[in-house]
Amino acid sequence: MSIRAVQGTDTARGQRLPRSARRAQLLEAAQAAFVESGYHAAAMDDIADRAGVSKPVLYQHFPGKLELYLALLDKHSEALEQLVREALASTTDNKERVYATIAAYFDFVSRDGAAFRLIFESDLTNESAVRNRLDAVGLVCAEAVAEVIAEDTGLTDEDASLLGMALTGLAQVSARHWLAQGSDVPKDEAALLMGALAWRGLGSFPKVGGEGS
């Protein structure tokens, strides 16, 4: 056990953290283990050690490894959804909305802790509870985009849904590729490049009333 883990254990034993703080501590440790080792290789012993707590303390908060993983998925799914909704609400200019939405995905994959891997590169997609959450966050983000497209273009909900899924899919895949390749292209420049590509397509659909972009 590392010196840091020992110190964390001493702190944990000498001081009772509020439940919310302890939960956040455990989730942080679990995220590090899952990102580093993957779900199947990560062990509850390792997670407890990283958090500086005993296994009984860990099990008091989470009955098992799957519950830890699902809690992290919920946390980071909500974070991604919030980034996308904030991007859409940041302006009424549709071109800028497209750019902002693409940038939201680049910001998400660049966050400390590589949380994006839990959502975009999960090794537990055969687990129905995980698959349902992954499908849900992808759909929620795509539908948020689709709502704006339908409102501004007059396209049917079905057509707008396809375009929303296309935009978020482009954003996700390009952001992950940019990060994985360790590109020399700065993040903001990469996001602008993909935004320009996306707008060339979406911008061809006229706005209802023909006013503005």
Image: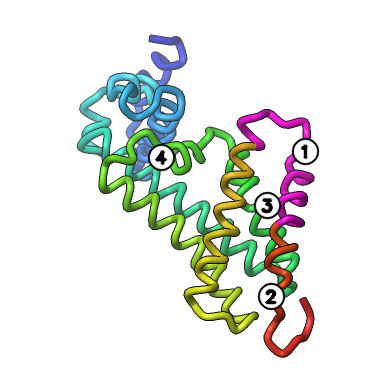
**Do the residues bearing badges 4 and 1 touch, measured as CB atoms within 8 Å?**
no
Apparent side of residue 182 relative to residue 154 in the rendered image (left or right): right
Residue denoted by label 2: 205
Residue denoted by label 3: 103
Please state the extent of the stretch shown in magenta in the rendering.
Answer: 178-197
What whole-number distance in Å separates the C-alpha atoms at marks 1 and 2? 30 Å
Whole-percent x, y for residue 173 in the image:
58, 44
Badge 4 density bin: few <14, some 14–19, many ≥20, Cα 10 Å: few
Q: Does 187 lie within the magenta span? A: yes
Residue at 53%, 33% in the rendered image: 113
Residue denoted by label 4: 24
Kind of residue at badge 4: Ala
Q: Secondary structure at mark 4?
A: helix
**Upstream in sequence: badge 1 or badge 2:** 1
Kind of residue at badge 2: Phe
Determine the image quadrant of residue 70: top left
